[in-house]
Image (tube, grey):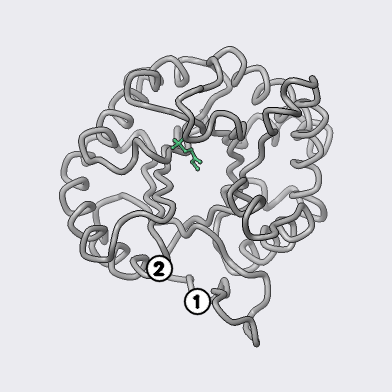
Amino acid sequence: MRKPIIAGNWKMFKTLPESVAFVKELAPRLGAYSGVERVVCPTFISVAAVSDALQGTGISVGAQNIHWEAQGAFTSQIAPGMLQGLVEYVIIGHSECRAYLNETDETVNKKVKAALAYGLKPIVAVGESLQQYEAGETETFVGGQVRAALNGVDAANMANIVIAYEPIWAIGTGKNATSDLANSIIGGTIRHTLVELYGNEIAQSVRIQYGGSVKPDNMFDYMSQPDIDGALVGGASLKVEDFTRLVEEAAKAKGV
Ligand code: 13P
Protein backbone atom coordinates (compact mmCIF):
# COMPACT_ATOMS: atom_id res chain seq x y z
CA MET A 1 0.00 0.00 0.00
CA ARG A 2 1.16 3.54 -0.73
CA LYS A 3 1.60 5.42 2.55
CA PRO A 4 -0.44 8.63 2.50
CA ILE A 5 1.66 11.80 2.57
CA ILE A 6 0.41 15.22 3.63
CA ALA A 7 2.85 18.06 3.07
CA GLY A 8 2.32 21.65 4.17
CA ASN A 9 3.88 24.12 1.76
CA TRP A 10 4.22 27.30 3.80
CA LYS A 11 5.35 29.34 0.79
CA MET A 12 6.58 32.79 1.95
CA PHE A 13 4.79 32.72 5.29
CA LYS A 14 6.03 32.57 8.88
CA THR A 15 9.16 34.03 10.45
CA LEU A 16 11.74 31.77 12.07
CA PRO A 17 10.29 32.13 15.60
CA GLU A 18 6.77 31.62 14.25
CA SER A 19 7.84 28.49 12.37
CA VAL A 20 9.49 26.91 15.41
CA ALA A 21 6.58 27.77 17.71
CA PHE A 22 4.17 26.31 15.15
CA VAL A 23 5.85 22.94 14.84
CA LYS A 24 6.29 22.64 18.61
CA GLU A 25 2.55 23.02 18.95
CA LEU A 26 1.77 20.81 15.95
CA ALA A 27 4.02 17.84 16.66
CA PRO A 28 2.26 16.46 19.75
CA ARG A 29 -1.09 16.75 18.01
CA LEU A 30 0.07 14.67 15.06
CA GLY A 31 1.89 12.07 17.14
CA ALA A 32 -0.89 9.50 16.89
CA TYR A 33 -1.07 9.52 13.10
CA SER A 34 2.06 7.65 12.17
CA GLY A 35 0.13 5.87 9.38
CA VAL A 36 0.26 9.18 7.50
CA GLU A 37 3.56 10.70 6.46
CA ARG A 38 3.55 14.32 7.67
CA VAL A 39 5.82 16.94 6.16
CA VAL A 40 6.27 20.68 6.75
CA CYS A 41 8.03 22.84 4.18
CA PRO A 42 9.09 26.18 5.72
CA THR A 43 11.16 28.89 4.07
CA PHE A 44 14.92 28.30 3.87
CA ILE A 45 15.64 30.60 6.80
CA SER A 46 13.64 28.32 9.12
CA VAL A 47 14.61 24.92 7.75
CA ALA A 48 17.44 24.19 10.21
CA ALA A 49 15.57 25.31 13.32
CA VAL A 50 12.37 23.52 12.31
CA SER A 51 14.34 20.38 11.55
CA ASP A 52 15.90 20.61 15.01
CA ALA A 53 12.55 21.18 16.71
CA LEU A 54 11.05 18.15 14.96
CA GLN A 55 13.80 15.67 15.89
CA GLY A 56 12.23 12.48 17.17
CA THR A 57 8.63 13.48 16.35
CA GLY A 58 8.24 11.47 13.16
CA ILE A 59 7.36 14.64 11.24
CA SER A 60 9.60 15.37 8.27
CA VAL A 61 10.85 18.62 6.82
CA GLY A 62 10.91 19.66 3.19
CA ALA A 63 12.53 22.58 1.41
CA GLN A 64 10.63 24.58 -1.19
CA ASN A 65 13.33 24.63 -3.88
CA ILE A 66 16.99 23.89 -4.61
CA HIS A 67 19.58 24.69 -7.23
CA TRP A 68 20.97 21.85 -9.35
CA GLU A 69 24.65 22.77 -9.06
CA ALA A 70 26.76 21.46 -6.18
CA GLN A 71 28.07 24.97 -5.41
CA GLY A 72 29.16 28.06 -7.26
CA ALA A 73 28.55 31.70 -8.07
CA PHE A 74 24.76 31.55 -7.93
CA THR A 75 23.81 34.40 -5.62
CA SER A 76 20.70 33.69 -3.53
CA GLN A 77 20.57 29.98 -4.35
CA ILE A 78 20.76 26.90 -2.12
CA ALA A 79 22.64 23.78 -3.20
CA PRO A 80 21.27 20.30 -2.52
CA GLY A 81 24.23 19.32 -0.34
CA MET A 82 23.44 22.24 1.98
CA LEU A 83 20.11 20.64 2.80
CA GLN A 84 21.47 17.19 3.55
CA GLY A 85 20.68 16.16 7.10
CA LEU A 86 18.15 18.98 7.43
CA VAL A 87 15.36 17.94 5.09
CA GLU A 88 14.02 14.70 3.69
CA TYR A 89 11.98 16.28 0.90
CA VAL A 90 12.26 19.14 -1.53
CA ILE A 91 9.43 20.62 -3.59
CA ILE A 92 10.53 21.03 -7.20
CA GLY A 93 8.65 22.71 -10.02
CA HIS A 94 5.95 24.45 -8.03
CA SER A 95 3.81 26.50 -10.39
CA GLU A 96 4.74 29.66 -8.50
CA CYS A 97 8.42 28.95 -9.25
CA ARG A 98 7.52 28.20 -12.86
CA ALA A 99 5.57 31.47 -13.09
CA TYR A 100 7.80 33.85 -11.12
CA LEU A 101 11.28 32.32 -10.99
CA ASN A 102 11.82 31.13 -14.56
CA GLU A 103 11.50 27.47 -13.63
CA THR A 104 11.21 25.38 -16.79
CA ASP A 105 10.74 21.69 -17.51
CA GLU A 106 14.47 21.57 -18.14
CA THR A 107 15.47 23.11 -14.78
CA VAL A 108 12.90 20.95 -13.01
CA ASN A 109 14.56 17.87 -14.50
CA LYS A 110 18.03 19.06 -13.47
CA LYS A 111 16.83 19.74 -9.94
CA VAL A 112 15.10 16.36 -9.65
CA LYS A 113 18.31 14.60 -10.63
CA ALA A 114 20.42 16.78 -8.32
CA ALA A 115 18.10 16.16 -5.37
CA LEU A 116 18.21 12.40 -5.90
CA ALA A 117 21.99 12.46 -6.18
CA TYR A 118 22.14 14.01 -2.71
CA GLY A 119 19.59 11.67 -1.16
CA LEU A 120 16.79 14.26 -1.06
CA LYS A 121 13.31 13.15 -2.10
CA PRO A 122 11.70 15.41 -4.72
CA ILE A 123 8.03 16.34 -4.53
CA VAL A 124 7.60 17.18 -8.19
CA ALA A 125 4.76 19.61 -8.82
CA VAL A 126 2.87 19.61 -12.12
CA GLY A 127 -0.39 21.17 -13.24
CA GLU A 128 -2.12 23.05 -16.00
CA SER A 129 -3.33 26.65 -16.24
CA LEU A 130 -6.99 27.61 -16.45
CA GLN A 131 -6.57 28.36 -20.14
CA GLN A 132 -5.12 24.91 -20.78
CA TYR A 133 -7.82 23.30 -18.67
CA GLU A 134 -10.56 25.07 -20.60
CA ALA A 135 -8.95 24.17 -23.92
CA GLY A 136 -8.97 20.49 -22.94
CA GLU A 137 -5.19 20.31 -22.91
CA THR A 138 -4.74 19.07 -19.34
CA GLU A 139 -3.82 15.47 -20.14
CA THR A 140 -1.28 16.29 -22.82
CA PHE A 141 0.28 19.10 -20.84
CA VAL A 142 0.51 17.35 -17.48
CA GLY A 143 1.71 14.12 -19.07
CA GLY A 144 4.41 16.15 -20.83
CA GLN A 145 5.48 17.82 -17.58
CA VAL A 146 5.83 14.42 -15.88
CA ARG A 147 7.89 13.02 -18.76
CA ALA A 148 10.14 16.07 -18.81
CA ALA A 149 10.67 16.10 -15.04
CA LEU A 150 11.64 12.42 -15.02
CA ASN A 151 13.80 12.44 -18.14
CA GLY A 152 16.83 10.28 -17.37
CA VAL A 153 15.60 9.28 -13.90
CA ASP A 154 16.01 5.54 -13.53
CA ALA A 155 13.43 3.16 -12.14
CA ALA A 156 15.36 2.50 -8.93
CA ASN A 157 14.91 6.15 -7.97
CA MET A 158 11.14 6.20 -8.33
CA ALA A 159 10.70 4.96 -4.76
CA ASN A 160 12.10 8.33 -3.67
CA ILE A 161 9.84 10.52 -5.77
CA VAL A 162 6.45 12.00 -4.96
CA ILE A 163 4.42 13.74 -7.64
CA ALA A 164 1.97 16.52 -6.79
CA TYR A 165 -0.81 17.35 -9.23
CA GLU A 166 -1.70 20.99 -8.64
CA PRO A 167 -3.94 22.57 -11.26
CA ILE A 168 -2.88 26.22 -11.25
CA TRP A 169 -6.47 27.41 -11.38
CA ALA A 170 -7.14 25.68 -8.05
CA ILE A 171 -4.20 27.10 -6.11
CA GLY A 172 -5.19 29.65 -3.49
CA THR A 173 -8.44 30.34 -5.32
CA GLY A 174 -10.88 28.30 -3.28
CA LYS A 175 -11.90 26.77 -6.64
CA ASN A 176 -10.66 23.28 -5.94
CA ALA A 177 -10.82 20.55 -8.58
CA THR A 178 -13.52 17.99 -7.80
CA SER A 179 -12.12 14.86 -6.25
CA ASP A 180 -13.29 12.85 -9.26
CA LEU A 181 -11.42 15.13 -11.65
CA ALA A 182 -8.28 15.09 -9.52
CA ASN A 183 -8.44 11.31 -9.27
CA SER A 184 -8.87 10.93 -13.01
CA ILE A 185 -5.84 13.07 -13.82
CA ILE A 186 -3.76 11.41 -11.12
CA GLY A 187 -4.89 7.84 -11.74
CA GLY A 188 -5.38 8.26 -15.46
CA THR A 189 -2.91 10.70 -16.95
CA ILE A 190 -0.10 10.71 -14.40
CA ARG A 191 -0.07 7.07 -13.38
CA HIS A 192 -0.50 5.98 -17.00
CA THR A 193 2.49 8.10 -17.94
CA LEU A 194 4.45 6.34 -15.20
CA VAL A 195 3.30 2.95 -16.55
CA GLU A 196 4.66 3.89 -19.97
CA LEU A 197 7.94 5.06 -18.47
CA TYR A 198 8.56 2.45 -15.78
CA GLY A 199 6.01 -0.35 -16.07
CA ASN A 200 2.96 -1.10 -14.00
CA GLU A 201 4.54 -2.28 -10.78
CA ILE A 202 6.59 0.86 -10.25
CA ALA A 203 3.78 3.12 -11.46
CA GLN A 204 1.47 1.63 -8.83
CA SER A 205 4.02 2.26 -6.09
CA VAL A 206 4.65 5.96 -6.71
CA ARG A 207 2.74 8.33 -4.46
CA ILE A 208 0.81 11.12 -6.15
CA GLN A 209 -0.69 14.02 -4.21
CA TYR A 210 -3.39 16.49 -5.11
CA GLY A 211 -2.89 20.18 -4.31
CA GLY A 212 -5.05 23.27 -4.77
CA SER A 213 -7.48 24.66 -2.17
CA VAL A 214 -7.33 21.54 -0.01
CA LYS A 215 -9.06 22.27 3.29
CA PRO A 216 -9.99 20.19 6.34
CA ASP A 217 -13.55 19.98 5.01
CA ASN A 218 -12.69 18.55 1.59
CA MET A 219 -9.72 16.42 2.65
CA PHE A 220 -11.76 13.30 3.37
CA ASP A 221 -13.33 13.48 -0.08
CA TYR A 222 -9.95 13.66 -1.85
CA MET A 223 -8.38 11.00 0.27
CA SER A 224 -11.30 8.64 -0.32
CA GLN A 225 -10.25 8.48 -3.97
CA PRO A 226 -8.19 5.39 -4.78
CA ASP A 227 -5.42 7.12 -6.72
CA ILE A 228 -4.94 10.19 -4.52
CA ASP A 229 -2.21 9.37 -2.03
CA GLY A 230 -2.00 12.64 -0.17
CA ALA A 231 -2.06 16.38 -0.48
CA LEU A 232 0.28 19.31 -0.93
CA VAL A 233 -1.41 22.05 1.04
CA GLY A 234 -0.77 25.78 1.12
CA GLY A 235 -3.17 28.00 3.06
CA ALA A 236 -4.71 25.32 5.27
CA SER A 237 -1.27 24.17 6.45
CA LEU A 238 -0.62 27.52 8.14
CA LYS A 239 -2.87 26.93 11.14
CA VAL A 240 -2.19 24.22 13.70
CA GLU A 241 -5.87 23.36 14.01
CA ASP A 242 -6.32 22.98 10.24
CA PHE A 243 -3.10 21.03 9.71
CA THR A 244 -4.15 18.63 12.47
CA ARG A 245 -7.54 18.10 10.90
CA LEU A 246 -6.01 17.53 7.46
CA VAL A 247 -3.96 14.67 8.87
CA GLU A 248 -6.90 13.30 10.88
CA GLU A 249 -9.15 13.28 7.82
CA ALA A 250 -6.47 11.60 5.71
CA ALA A 251 -5.99 8.89 8.34
CA LYS A 252 -9.73 8.34 8.54
CA ALA A 253 -10.24 8.15 4.78
CA LYS A 254 -7.34 5.76 4.19
CA GLY A 255 -8.08 3.69 7.32
CA VAL A 256 -4.57 4.07 8.74
P1 13P B 1 -3.46 26.30 -1.51
O1 13P B 1 -3.69 25.06 -0.64
O2 13P B 1 -3.33 27.54 -0.68
O3 13P B 1 -4.46 26.39 -2.61
O4 13P B 1 -2.02 26.10 -2.18
C1 13P B 1 -1.75 24.92 -2.86
C2 13P B 1 -0.32 24.88 -3.16
O5 13P B 1 0.17 25.60 -4.00
C3 13P B 1 0.52 23.93 -2.40
O6 13P B 1 1.78 23.80 -2.96
Type of residue at label 1? Met
Picture coordinates of residue 147, whole percent (x, y): 80, 43
Q: Residue drawn 35% across and 54% down?
A: 13
Q: Is residue 163 left or right of residue 102?
A: left
Between 119 and 53, the residue placed more toward the observer is 53
In three-dimensional space, the C-alpha distance between marks 2 and 1, rounded to whole angstroms, equals 8 Å
According to the picture, the residue beneath numbered tag 2 turns out to be: 86
236 is higher (above) or lower (below) than 106: above
Q: Residue drawn 62% across and 37% down?
A: 206
Type of residue at label 2? Leu
Quarter occupied by residue 219: top left
Between 180 and 234, the residue placed more toward the observer is 234
Picture coordinates of residue 225, whole percent (x, y): 52, 16
Quarter occupied by residue 48: bottom left
Task: Tell me the SS state at disc 1.
Answer: helix
Q: Which mark is residue 82?
A: 1
Q: Is residue 74 left or right of residue 38?
A: right
Task: Tell me the SS state at disc 2.
Answer: loop
Q: Which mark is residue 241?
A: none
Mark 1 surroundings within 10 Å by alpha-carbon count, few (fewer than 14), some (14 through 19), many (20 or more): few
Q: Is residue 51 left or right of residue 110?
A: left
Q: Are marks 2 and 1 in contact (CB under 8 Å)?
A: yes
Q: Is residue 209 left or right of residue 238?
A: right
For the C terminus, the quadrant is: top left
